[in-house]
Image (cartoon, helix red, strand yellow):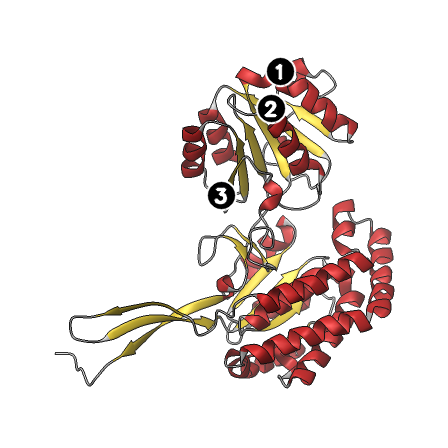
Amino acid sequence: MEIKEQISLMAKTAKEMAPAIATAKTDVKNKALKKIAQGLKDQLASLLEANAKDVAYAQEKGLSKAMIDRLTLTEDRVEGMINNLYEVIALPDPVGNITKMWLRPNGLKVGRMRIPLGVIGMIYEARPDATIEAAALCLKAGNVVILRGGSEAINSNIILGNIMTAALVKAGLPEKAIQVVPITDRDAVLALLEMEEYIDLIIPRGGEGLIRFVTEHAKMPVLKHYKGVCHVYVDDKADLEKAKKICFNAKVQRPGVCNAMETLLVHEGIAEKFLPDMLKTFSQAGVEIRGCPKTCNLFPSAKAATEEDWPAEYLDLILAVKIVADMEEAINHIAKYGSNHTEAIVTENYSRAWEFLEKVDASVVLVNASTRFNDGNQLGLGSEIGISTSKLHAYGPMSLEELTTTKFIVFGEGQIRT
């Protein structure tokens, strides 16, 4: 069977399964999720063995440290996947919720009801844990999902696909409600992006190149974020000890992810007091500093930043640093170079905090907290399928509610329009 024919069959089957999943009861969906969790426990050895093959292949290909980090599974990470499944189980089912209801002068009762999106295609790189996250969230929100992971994770994803298929059958749900594309050829992605007749939404998750490729070729709506160029602005009214902890966490705790800080902006009023010690701490942690001229004067071991550094998503222990005259310059810098992902201010000044919140356009804006909190789980949403920097129809971390839409429902008593 040719690739396009195989993908077409998968997409058509998914569409056929959609009504059954859309109307599945919450306890049945939760039963399937519990069976997936049990399957992960039972198949742990096989999963880690398959993942080791993927990691070895990725290392042979010379993939980046960030990519290999996202690809690698350990017992602890699998345990985290299991915990995420139980968090999704605990979340309220949004399907069928009435979000609004109002009475019209003619007596009609009008409301809005949450419904699944339908069939979702997920295209992503590395991250086998994303396979489970995406499947769990889509299923709980009443959606059918087709998962196409990167070629570097194919062995891990096939095992995960088998676990999920078995779980669906045990729960009494259609086994094709979750499908993993077993084809590593890029033509499979192109074929998937042409299936607008069957697929309602595509969600790409990965590097900027992948997301731009998907956006360019998809014939159906795409929810995306191109990259995470995240800033922390340290105001002259900041608590500097607090700022030091926040900045260090935002950059160093896990540098290879999209919500890590890439540029540090510092008010000139506290730069001399704050930066030398802060940058020394970064350097001791292995962070390469690329600074503006004023930063290099304060910290001579910094490399001179170029124009290419300000919009860069390093996903590594590299940090761009700029000293700004005031908050207005910081906000203007973010507007020019940011990616609408995550931005933070450190300040003890209430009015400045609110001005920053109001003026900065990003899916999450934080006051006195690390950028690393732009995460569905950390924000109390449970697992997420990704972070959207599109504004239609979701902005920020996408969890269950963002994987549904609403339809109008109307109750009448025989009214006719005149």
Residue type, label 2: Leu
Tell me the residue that label 1 is attached to: 273
- Which tag, 3 or 1, sits closer to the chain's start? 1
Q: Residue furthest left?
A: 418
Q: Where residue 89 appears, x then y in whole percent?
A: 61, 69
Q: Secondary structure at mark 3?
A: loop
Q: How many numbered marks are there?
A: 3
Tags 2 and 1 touching, CB below 8 Å: yes
**Between marks 3 and 2 in the image, the one whose residue lies nearer the viewer:** 2
Residue type, label 3: Ala
Alpha-carbon span between mark 3 and mark 2:
24 Å
- Which tag, 3 or 2, sits closer to the chain's start? 2
Q: Secondary structure at mark 1?
A: helix
Quadrant for residue 397, please give it: bottom right
Tell me the residue that label 3 is attached to: 362
Q: Where residue 257 appears, x then y in whole percent?
A: 67, 46
